[in-house]
Image: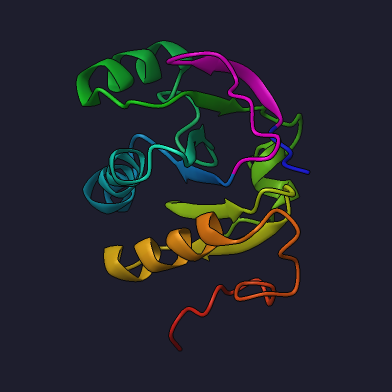
Amino acid sequence: MIRIDAAAWLNGAAPATEGKVVALHAFQMLCPGCVAQGIPQAVKLRQAFPELVVIGLHSVFEHHDVMTPRALEAFLHEYRLPFPVALDRPLAGSPVPATMQHYQLRGTPSLLLFDRAGQLRLNHFGSLDDMVLGGVVGRLLAEPDDARGHACADGRCALPG
């Protein structure tokens, strides 16, 4: 089951994910790798695979005082992201927010892919080649509903290396 602990949703309501393949893109608006690579890749995923549910997750673990919800609203407007974005819920006494902690993300950008059963099949930190990612997503979308144990069951979805 996909767990997103959101303080709020921007750019749309929380999407229905049951029975869907889901890409969860964790980012920070002041992260150079997110702006240059992660966000454009998430937008391309949404365009290339309309049946894929793409969700942004704004996970602030640094520069908390400037990455406010209001600043994020302006960022989303300027970058015209075509998918809903969850504000990862801050945790008292911790710089790392709830969803980021739950999935043990190492930083941003991070990409999580879930199969139709809601099972985490990929947890990737950093950039990932578009062609490799397209192949992984294509395999997940092609799996039958009862495909546990098939091509991506090892959690790496046949990533190189």
Q: Nearer the viewer, residue 11 or 149?
A: 149
- The C terminus lies in quadrant: bottom left
Residue at the spot x=35%, y=34% of the render? 29
Residue 7 on the magenta span: yes
Part of the protein shown in magenta:
5-20
Residue at the spot x=53%, y=43% of the render? 24
Q: Is residue 127 visible?
A: no
- The N terminus lies in quadrant: top right
Residue 110 on the magenta span: no
> In x, y percent, where is residue 71?
36, 16
Res 43 quadrant in image: top left
Q: Is residue 1 above or below residue 15?
A: below
Horizontal placement of 52 versus 47: left or right? right
> In x, y percent, where is residue 27?
44, 42
Please identify the dominant SS of the magenta region.
loop
Q: What colour-coding does the image apply?
A: rainbow
Q: Is residue 23 above or below residue 50?
A: below
Residue at the spot x=50%, y=65% of the render? 139
